[in-house]
Image: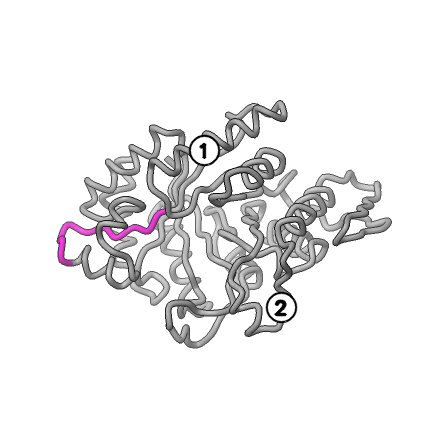
Amino acid sequence: MDVRIVTEPQQGSDYDMQCKAARAVEELGFDGFFRSDHYLAMDEVEGLPGPTDAWITLAGLARETTRIRLGTLVSAATFRLPGPLAVQVAQVDRMSGGRVELGLGTGWFDEEHRAYGIPFPPDRFARFEEQLAVITGLWSTAHGDRFDFDGEYYRLLDSPALPKPAQDLVPIIIGGTGPVRTPRLAARYATEFNMPYASIQDTAVQLDRVRAAADAIGRDPASLILSAALVACIDDDPAEVARQTALMGIEHTDLQRTGLAGSPAQAVDTIGRYAEIGVTRVYLMIPELERGDLTHLELIAAQVLPQL
């Protein structure tokens, strides 16, 4: 099982805190450090000192780490034009020595769009699909060739399609719960499909849809990495688990159904149940990591990772 850490820095984590966390993730033996891409704090949190841009931050972390995978879970297609985003991600990939992955979604948080003057169009899914076509098209265009794209929302003419990433193709992560369009796009464009914060039962249903969508276009379903993002409130002390769960604003019974809530042994058992339905990678969101508290990151590294 590949185990990565995902954070929500808009809740109150500056660059120094994220750098501290990423270095700890690397030193403790996790496989990756991923972050959300948001400009506005949620759940009535001030988020001081304010948001950090995902790709500027990842550029810094690319130079501060040496082994772990880095990326977004996920960037919003509404935030950036696809051409400049392809350039940004390719550059960060080169800065990291080929360790970057792009999680991309439609964008959903309308309040942050209003707060920072970002358009929030109703046809976001169609734009998202064109962004995937443009980004992957730019990266896959051979050196010396030109890339053109004539879509409804984006048009590129005679592009040199540079720079190229360090990797032949940066892995693309697509996720979500949509029953039809999301699996279809994942089957066509994704290296990895991610099911975010869902029960084992709901995850199994969506993974079956993704496999079916891949099969329908002649793609081997086994070529898709299947992953799950899980809130992880883990401790040997039930009272501490309850405190962490309350901090996340989640009912304990809900988290037991859709995440990890309990002892390290219980967490290992639950992750094993996700593995049984085909999940080979998990992203763990750990309370208080954004605030620089490494206690539970260290506990998971010591008592959960060795059993996976």
Q: Secondary structure at mark 1?
A: helix
* Residue type, label 1: Leu
**Percent of width and height locating residue 119:** 64, 66
Name the residue rendered at 29%, 33% in the picture: 272
Q: Secondary structure at mark 2?
A: loop
**Percent of width and height locating residue 145:** 84, 41
* Residue type, label 2: Ile
Q: Which mark is residue 118?
A: 2
Q: Which mark is residue 207?
A: 1
Asked if residue 281 is among those painted magenta in the image, a careful observer would answer no
Which of the pair 129/36 is nearer the observer? 129
Name the residue rendered at 36%, 53% in the picture: 285
Q: Residues within 10 Å of mark 2 (few under 14, many from 20)?
A: some
- Which quadrant of the figure contains the C terminus? top left
Which of the pair 264/180 is nearer the observer? 180
Asked if residue 233 is among those painted magenta in the image, a careful observer would answer yes
Q: Residues within 10 Å of mark 1 (few under 14, many from 20)?
A: many
Using the numbered discs, state the Cα–Cα distance from disc 1 to disc 2 in whole angstroms.
32 Å
Report the span colored magenta. 230-239
**Percent of width and height locating residue 134:** 72, 47
**Percent of width and height locating residue 107:** 56, 57
